[in-house]
Amino acid sequence: MSVLLDRNTRVVVQGLGREGSFHAARMKEYGTKVVGATKPGKGGTTQEGVPLFDTMAQAVDATDANTSIVFVPAPFAMDAMLEAIDAGIDLVIAITEGIPVADMLKVAAVLETSGTTLVGPNGPGAITPGQAKVGIMPAENFSPGGIGFVSRSGTLTYEIADLLTRAGLGQSTCIGVGGDPVVGLPTPDAVRLLNEDPATEAIVIVGEIGGSAEEHAAEYLRAEGKKPAVAFIAGRSAPPGKRMGHAGAIVSGNQGTAESKVRAFEEAGIPVANAPSEIPDLVKQALRR
Amino acid sequence: MSVLLDRNTRVVVQGLGREGSFHAARMKEYGTKVVGATKPGKGGTTQEGVPLFDTMAQAVDATDANTSIVFVPAPFAMDAMLEAIDAGIDLVIAITEGIPVADMLKVAAVLETSGTTLVGPNGPGAITPGQAKVGIMPAENFSPGGIGFVSRSGTLTYEIADLLTRAGLGQSTCIGVGGDPVVGLPTPDAVRLLNEDPATEAIVIVGEIGGSAEEHAAEYLRAEGKKPAVAFIAGRSAPPGKRMGHAGAIVSGNQGTAESKVRAFEEAGIPVANAPSEIPDLVKQALRR
Amino acid sequence: MKLHEYQAKQLLARAGIPIPDGRLATTADEAERAARAIGASVAVKAQVHVGGRGKAGGIRIAKTPAEARDAAKAILGLEIKGLRVEKVYVERAADVDRELYLGITLDRDRRRPVVMLSTVGGMDIEQVAATDPDKIARGWPSPLLGLLPFEARALAFEAGVPEPQRDAVADIARKLFTVYVQTDASLVEINPLFVQKDRSLLAGDAKLDVDDNALYRQPELAKLKEISRDEEAEEKARALGFSYVQLDGDVGIIGNGAGLVMSTLDAVKLAGGRAANFLDVGGGAKEEVVRNALEIVLANPRVRSVLINIFGGITRGDEVAKGILAVIATHPPRVPLVIRLSGTEAEAGRKLLASAPLESRETMDDAAKEAVRLAKEPVRV
Amino acid sequence: MKLHEYQAKQLLARAGIPIPDGRLATTADEAERAARAIGASVAVKAQVHVGGRGKAGGIRIAKTPAEARDAAKAILGLEIKGLRVEKVYVERAADVDRELYLGITLDRDRRRPVVMLSTVGGMDIEQVAATDPDKIARGWPSPLLGLLPFEARALAFEAGVPEPQRDAVADIARKLFTVYVQTDASLVEINPLFVQKDRSLLAGDAKLDVDDNALYRQPELAKLKEISRDEEAEEKARALGFSYVQLDGDVGIIGNGAGLVMSTLDAVKLAGGRAANFLDVGGGAKEEVVRNALEIVLANPRVRSVLINIFGGITRGDEVAKGILAVIATHPPRVPLVIRLSGTEAEAGRKLLASAPLESRETMDDAAKEAVRLAKEPVRV
């Protein structure tokens, strides 16, 4: 068991450019079933062993795909996501960064009435180690196990997965929810999936300053948490009022500060690591209790 | 039993102008629970015994209304319908005529993901004789009974209800679905409601040339009809290519002609009256079988 | 409301859709000057609000300005389906390789706009729809999101538009959808959409009908309204809030509600007569309304009797009766009237009419029979 | 991207929102002429991309053109929060009765725009939100339908806007929402929205921030971009595809991924040091990228050591190592470097760097400790 993706995951790649084809090859190497890619006008041909389709609808018809991964450039990403939703894809994972917020608001509105789950954009994707990887993460840092892992950050995800793996803490599913202000599966929703996943024994939540997703995740776990959890917040040293990178980590007022997030987790009885390196020990302690 | 409206119907009037207040009074006379009306800026006052509210949300909060009737002029009707839907009203009945199709397309899109049923626009409303009238029909033509009655036409509804009543055929619920090209509850959906209503013993369907709602209703009854039905199509003498009034009855190609509709009903084993005056006898014959 | 080709094309051009260089002309002189300014072979095209102008001689190709002059002379003043041609559009002739069809209208069943694209252009699309439905690719964009790029692309693939034009056609489809939304169109069509020999695209013809109910918020388009002589009566009726359609029988019809009026027409036909018109006075008819309605119906010289069928709802029978009495008193009609009043205050109305010089009947069928009988009687003097 | 008040107001005016008569001036002369043209008392307002200009002396009222001249002289050249005032906006003074607040921004939790309206205008709205949240009416319109009339009306009722202005405020809210959508704004605000003594409304101040990710499709707005001296380094970094924020410590930071870089800053702080900057090189860093990043970080004279923390995903460790070696070979850095490489091809990278004049560490914590230690050492000559 796992959430979002497993051995039955069948992926169509949307945007088989340089980055898309590089990562399609890495996903195949990992054993993910990459069943097709969309490339309008090239339908019926193949590229590096991947069958190409003109439209998502055709790709789904022909391959029974249930997942897509979006690499298309930001100006075309909304269209790609909506095409995947329209084609009835269960899980869309959007890697693209730099998508206008207005586009994501439209996508979010369409998601409200669709059966599709969107992970991202501007995230590394998701991986169920040993079963399927739909993303751009370096696979060697991940290993199968019982830790469900949610992160708003890309490279920090690899860092922490590496620490967990070295500590012998394999992962059930790792979900990079994406760093944009508007994402398809916000941290609280991702946490809920893992909380309800029988294969997940403990949850690691990696947040960032800005927004209040971590606070909501903490509230949820306080009320309904079924398993131990450990948190980490990046940006605790950030001065207020400064915008740190594309992550949308804007600190303003009392909302979204590291303090507010740390307090929320502590009030929910969830230990908060001071540095990524502390996470594995905290997880082990939490599992022992 | 009945469909859409009954003794528990609690109506808010949207648009208490000259026409709205005239018909609000007629509805109250009939015994319909007219619990309020919206008149922005007049919230907290009353008009002719009807409590006024600034917004639909306030009206629903204060009165527990489950139904609204829309009389506001066409340029503001979309807003009124969307306000009612947003306020969680179960049944919206729109009397207004002349609403742009583009506005109704937006309303229809919103309806798709709401729990609200819209009857109309550009129709006379609906009545469950003896229980509630939410519309502009002259009540004296209607009487309680077992005939479910769906009509695309306004005055023709009164005419036929009068004929049914005189023939001793009372009505369960009469639904004037409205004459516009885009309506909230098209004929087939209204027929489905009546087909599934235990209090309805037979169904009368009054259609018009244009569109294919009657064909779809016939198909539905052919497959799933549980009770006898009788149909009438207005406009059988209309020459092709002529547009007859606001009803949107445009005859073009092979679609939407009187012949096509009559054929569809006959193929479903549903007798079609040549004139409204034939309807009561056909209903009686159908009930006898 | 229908726009002329040249008006529709201006709207398309504003949205970025390529159209041929063209100029409007109302005289042969102007047409010649237009052809000279264009400096190439031109098409001279009648601007009338009916289809089939090509078959009726309303389109001519001219290789020189002098030929354009002759073409305009031949076309201007022509009657096409009863409409006199008063304007021609002089347009650079396209270098046509193939013809596509692109149109957007309402799909009533789906309650969405439908975008239709076909490589069988230049034909009557309803014909194609009837005989070769697979040749038309259809898409139903959400009215809340518009025609998305992927939807336009999918249409182009489904229709089989070949590579060199595929993206351009999808782009034009999206622009046309913008026109459809921004003009509150009930129909917008490019047929044919030319593929030229140099592979570029060009709107060959354009049709745009505006939703009459939306004209109040389309002031720029409302100004383009033109009323032909044929449509004058309909237009006059519309200005009074009526729906009026002239037919070719002799029984004038006045009623309230489209369905009721249509049924009245049907009843006249069943009684062996032929209706002279469709006239729906709408709701709440009073004296002045009745007078105006009678005036419009009687303006048709073919009318030999008038059947007034009112079922009161909003409309009150006594008000209608008063209206009729007032009209009879001041402008006695030249033909017999048959009245059928029912519904709200109908009894009061019938009482008022009891001694008036007209026939009153209780049912629609009886009233129709009487009106048909009277229409067949010799004309009273 | 931030717009100046005068630019934002032009966009509001174009959408039909009333703004005072105003003119831009870059000299005292121009300000005097502007005041004369306006012919009334004016406000002379500094145009700088920071808040709180009023308290900093950036706004003055002038009753005569001569006073406007003096006011402009006093304001132009002023430094407000480190930004030099180079333009003033001369604007007809409003006849203020009351002040409202109207703003639109993103509600991340609801994934919708939030429209906020309050009768407590002129204040810092975050202050009001914290102390008096009930004083702010909020609405969350659908991004697919826009701010509907009933929603705007409900906001005006909820905020308690009194009758004479209620409809006008609702109307302005809808127009402001159109501006928000059409400009791809991340924030648009009218604060204060003046109610004048004659009951009319007027935008007192206007703020508009544009979503940087949407600038590609907002060419007109992109042209309005102005870079202050403070922002030059950030801007230069952005042009190279980096995110850069200058801070006030002495440990220069380079990393890939916003979260990782933030964690690196945190690690430096935990190790007792202070970061000099935030620099995220993004994905796929190669030689030139590393060189550019180092150049930006070292341009800050406060930097006494540099910590490079790369966790390879798209980015390959060997490429990063090659970049560092090339930079060291051609432009030996003036301060010690500490490198931490992990992830894709990290081992290969570490091998390449083995003999280079820099410190390499296996973990983020160790690397941070070393960088902090080095920053505290006496400067090497």
Image (cartoon, coloured by chain):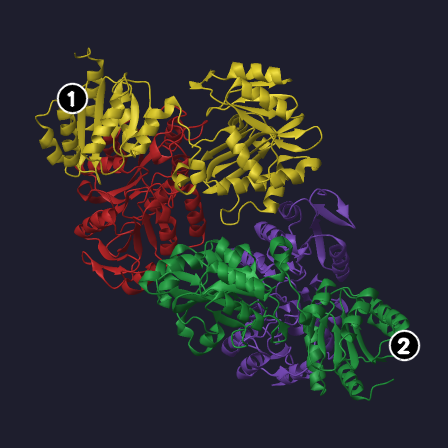
Chain colours: A purple, B red, C yellow, D green
Q: Nearer the viewer, residue B60 or D86?
A: D86
| Identity, as a three-letter code, of the amino acid under mark 1 | Pro
Which of the 4 image quadrants contains residue B168? top left
Q: Nearer the viewer, residue C130 or C285?
A: C285
- Mark nearest the camera among 2 and 1 is 1
Please say if B122 is above or below A165.
above
Which of the 4 image quadrants contains residue D332? bottom right
Question: What is the x, y in percent for residue D150?
Answer: 38, 57
Question: What is the x, y in percent for residue C146?
Answer: 53, 46
Instruction: Name the chain under label 2.
Output: D
Question: What is the x, y in percent for residue D201?
Answer: 40, 61
Rendered-image quadrant of the C terminus of chain D = bottom right
Seen from this angle, which residue lies furthest front? D66
Location of mark 2 (residue): D356
Please say if C345 is above or below B50.
above
Location of mark 1 (residue): C332
| Identity, as a three-letter code, of the amino acid under mark 2 | Ala
Q: Is residue C274 left or right of residue C49?
A: left
